[in-house]
Image (cartoon, helix red, strand yellow):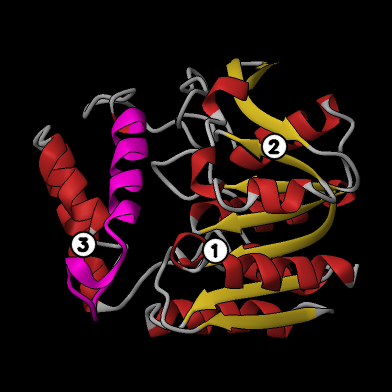
Amino acid sequence: MDTVAELRCFTSSDGDLAYHDSGTGDPVVLLHSGFVDHRLFADQIPALAAHHRVIAPDVRGHGSSANATQPFRWADDLAALLRHLDAGPAVLVGVSMGGAIATDTVLEHPELVRAVVVCGAATSEFEYTDPWSRRIQAEFARTLGAGDVEGWLNAFVRVAPGEHRGPDGVDPDIPRRLREMALHTISKHTPDEKDLRVPVTGTWDRVPTIDVPVLAVNGSLEPADLTAAAERLVREVRDGRAATVEGAGHYACMEQPEVFNAILLDFLRTL
């Protein structure tokens, strides 16, 4: 599925932001994880577009979207896109970084959100504490700082199998796809580039104000601290739900797309 060829552009206040838009019906927005792009959801877009309008942006600084030249918040970018498309309130489905963007958006722009699904995520203020994840993050920083793109890519795709499996523990097409997307994104940036992203703060204190349904989907092989944060998120909202994809890691939507899609479609039918 070549969704890149079907990308459209929204002219934001700071450059063009790319997005895929297909299907008709109630809008569902797919928000990808860090360093990749909307192609993360190659297995979700057609399944969802059969009954919904599916909008899959490339987050600012990723994929085919512009880098920032001024301070920004990803939640504000998404809100501007949804208003431009007259697509709110929408169901936001986010993986990892995308899940953090989804929770930021429901907190900052609640009128645009009908429901939230986070996968491998909680709020944008979650930080890994387990030793394995911290080592991977340190390797990210070391290789990026040295301009070692190949070393960084090797560390990046190591997240797919995770701590408890070797590189051959996942379908080799998954790290291949991740590597292709990540190389595209990382090539847009330089080691000395200033980080202009403005974080959303006070998220955990405000989680109880979220009054739309929130579903947390996690692979059973995710680190315990991430799973605990996701459980806290759904426990503290008015309508929180949880589902587990057995035998999957951080990219459950890629590892077990049929299971992931079934969970997502079942949730959408309840709204």
Q: Is residue 77 above or below residue 203?
A: above
The front one of 6 and 92 is 6
The disc labelled 2 sits on which kind of residue?
Leu
Residue 71 visible to the viewer: no
Give the label on residue 42, or none. none
Segment tinted magenta in the rendering: 162-185
The disc labelled 1 sits on which kind of residue?
Pro
| Residue at which label 3 appears | 136
Q: Residues within 10 Å of mark 1 (few under 14, many from 20)?
A: some
Which mark sits nearer the N-terminus, 1 or 3? 3
Query: Where in the figure is residue 198, as x and y percent of width and height?
Result: 53, 39
Which mark sits nearer the N-terminus, 1 or 2? 2
In what element is the residue under mark 3? helix
The residue that appears at 76% across and 66% down in the rendered structure is 265
The front one of 6 and 213 is 6
Q: Is residue 143 above or below residue 17?
A: below
Marks 1 and 2 sit apart, C-alpha to C-alpha, by 25 Å
Marks 1,3: beta carbons within 8 A: no
In what element is the residue under mark 1? helix
Query: Where in the figure is residue 143, as x and y percent of width and height?
Result: 12, 44
The disc labelled 3 sits on which kind of residue?
Ile
| Residue at which label 1 appears | 257
Marks 3 and 2 sit apart, C-alpha to C-alpha, by 29 Å
The residue that appears at 89% across and 73% down in the rendered structure is 270
| Residue at which label 2 appears | 78
Query: Where in the figure is residue 151, as x and y percent of width and height?
Result: 11, 45
Side (left or right) of 202 relative to 270: left
Which mark sits nearer the N-terminus, 3 or 2? 2
Side (left or right) of 66 relative to 142: right
